[in-house]
Amino acid sequence: MTTLATAPSPRAADTDRVLVVGIDGVRLDLLPSLGTPHLDGVARAGFLAPVEVDAATPTMSGPCWTTIATGVGVAKHGVWGNRLDGNRLDVFPDFTTRLAADCGRRTFAVGGWEPLFLARQGGPLFTAPTRLGYVAPGADTPEGWEEVDDLVTAEAEHLLGLDEELHAGFVYLGAVDETAHFLGCGPEYRRAVEAADRRLGRLLAAARARPGRWTVVVVTDHGHRDEGGHGGRSPEERTAWIAACGPGLSPGTVRPVLHHADVAAHVYTALGVVPDPHWTLDGAAFTV
């Protein structure tokens, strides 16, 4: 039997697994008015808490996702924009690569934004997970990105259903962010958030169908201005969020302040991996 949220466990078990779902550009202040039952379920079983993009980090996808995946800030990983040129990912790799290369764990990463998954624009961020999936947009439009996210979700469902050992995965959904850039944060944007939640539901169902004790983390990188767009310092742009549930995460219990770098740190903790001090992680596990 698979559980997504249980009573606290003092140590990771051999059956512990982690799924991180990154949904780009979701405004926290709009979530209460939207139909997001699957995200709400994760929050009820654990927590959903705000994250403020720190003053040193541009409110852009490249630096924020790099901090989320590596567990270190911009001063260490060296990604300052949506081009990943000049990065230090050889020293500070993403968690799917580190777990596979240094810890003997099987991992995957899948999504449709080139710098995260391909050797383009200074990427990839996800350098060498055990399995890597990329879905190219057929058109750079909101509709094209909805199609990408459907295919990305299907690929992740496939990977979660394989009859092989699996410890951690990252799934990137980008249609919400692209819709905001094209159309602002109006009705189409809100529908895109709800569509992303339905895809989250599919991913949760695929995890439930696989034996193990799952920690689920859902995270966004930044917000948006009302008219669409980000990169500035307004509260709407700087406010991100993390939701998580799983072993060791009691409902409603979380540290008072969370940071993007905590995501990778919690992945390691959930799998019973003690970070080497030489990794110099900036984050810490979610548990208080």
Image (cartoon, rainbow, N blue to C red):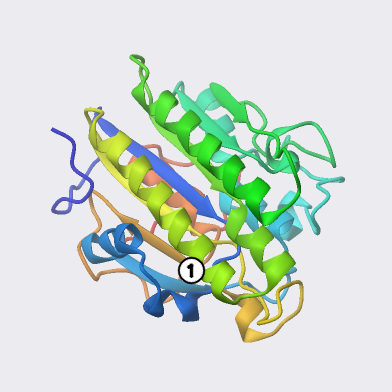
Q: Is residue 214 left or right of residue 19?
A: left
Q: Position of residue 119 (x, y in %)?
A: 79, 31
Q: Position of residue 57 (x, y in %)?
A: 72, 68
Q: Is residue 121 visible to the viewer in this orientation of the structure?
A: yes
Q: Relative to 65, does residue 166 appear above or below in the rendering? A: above
Identity of the residue drawn at 32% across and 69% down: 254
Identity of the residue drawn at 62% across and 68% down: 222
Where residue 136 sits, quadrant-wise, is top right
Q: Is residue 109 left or right of residue 39?
A: right
Q: Relative to 204, does residue 217 appear above or below in the rendering? A: below
Q: Is residue 57 visible to the viewer in this orientation of the structure?
A: no
Where residue 166 sits, quadrant-wise, is top left
Query: Which residue lies most toward the top here?
Result: 163
Q: Relative to 93, does residue 51 appear above or below in the rendering? A: below
Q: Quadrant of the C terminus?
A: bottom left
Identity of the residue drawn at 68% across and 59% down: 178
Disc 1 crowd rating (10 Å Cα; few below 14, some 14-19, many 20+) is many
Q: Which residue is mark 1?
A: 241
Camera-nearest residue between 194 and 47: 194
Identity of the residue drawn at 71% across and 80% down: 227
Camera-nearest residue between 56 and 229: 229
> Mark 1 belongs to which amino acid?
Trp
